[in-house]
Amino acid sequence: LRNYYTAVSSPGSGLPVYSSVGYVDDKEITNYNSDTRQHLPKTEWMKKEGSEYWEEETQKNHGAEPVFKHNVQIAMSRFNQTGGIHIYQGMYGCELRDDGTTVGYNQIGYDGREFMSLDTQRGIWIPTMNEAQITTQRWNSPEERDGERWKNYLENICIDWLKKYIGYGREDLERRVRPEVKVWGHRQSDDVTRLQCLVYGFHPRPVDVKWVRNGEDDVPSDEMTPILPHPDGTYQIRVSVEVPTKEGDSYSCHVEHSSL
């Protein structure tokens, strides 16, 4: 379970000035932003939560929106910035592993770099940048103990919500769809051939794709696309390599996926 909160310093970036998005695994399950002003379900199975839940979450976001907008302004002042478009982002969540153990995390970023993070073992905030020290000192103070509250939330409440959401969407989340694979080659010159391997239509998202020479030697890929989503909820990836054009060598594309 992961939640992203994003605030943008000023309109005009193409992004909402505030948004909150929830994920289970790679699936977006909830979305709120300053344009819709409503916390909305993004999967059919999240609609199992009643109207009271959506109203309550909408009200929480109405309260969080001005706080996050204010946080962008504070961060800008710490970096002595007076204009431009700046982004303040929080990401927190928890994981339930196959062996029953759990892990939690909470990170805050500014303009694409980590600003501070929660040490979930000790329940204290750690500054990643000098500009974050004032905030971490205050949040770690005996009066606030913000990190301790987050530690408790991530170890207990977050895991309870995750279990609930998994119960709602188990069939969708645990769906296994085998990948289709297409390979082809194109001679770049007399002595170089580019090989392409397209792996598509698979679910869930994690996959490992590599080219192998003569059944045993891994060939480092020189181009790999990100794992991209399809409208039907499956994914695709393309991996390509340049190899010497010569007789005797055989090349194969190896795919590892949980459906196989």
Image (spheres, rainbow, N blue to C red):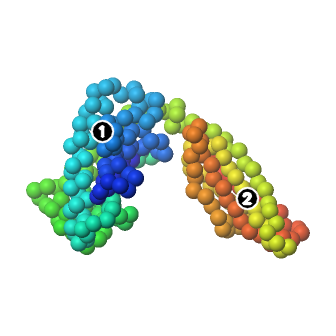
Q: Amino acid at mark 2?
A: Gln
Residue 235 picture location, percent across and down: 60, 46
Viewer-side label of 2, 1: 1
Q: For numbered disc 1, what is the local secondary structure? A: loop
N-terminal of the pair, mark 2 or mark 1, is 1
Residue 100, quarter of picture: top left
Relative placement, left or right, of 92 versus 236 is left
| Residue at mark 2 | 196
Q: Is residue 235 above or below residue 121?
A: above
Residue 221 showing in the rendered view = yes
In the image, what residue occupies the spot 65% across and 42% down?
A: 201
| Quarter of the figure with the N terminus | top left
Residue farthest to the left? 143
| Residue at mark 1 | 37
Relative placement, left or right, of 234 versus 244 is left
In the image, what residue occupies the spot 52% across and 31% down?
A: 171
Q: Amino acid at mark 1?
A: Arg
Relative placement, left or right, of 30 versus 175 is left
In the image, what residue occupies the spot 21% across and 55% down?
A: 70
In the image, what residue occupies the spot 25% across and 33% down?
A: 56
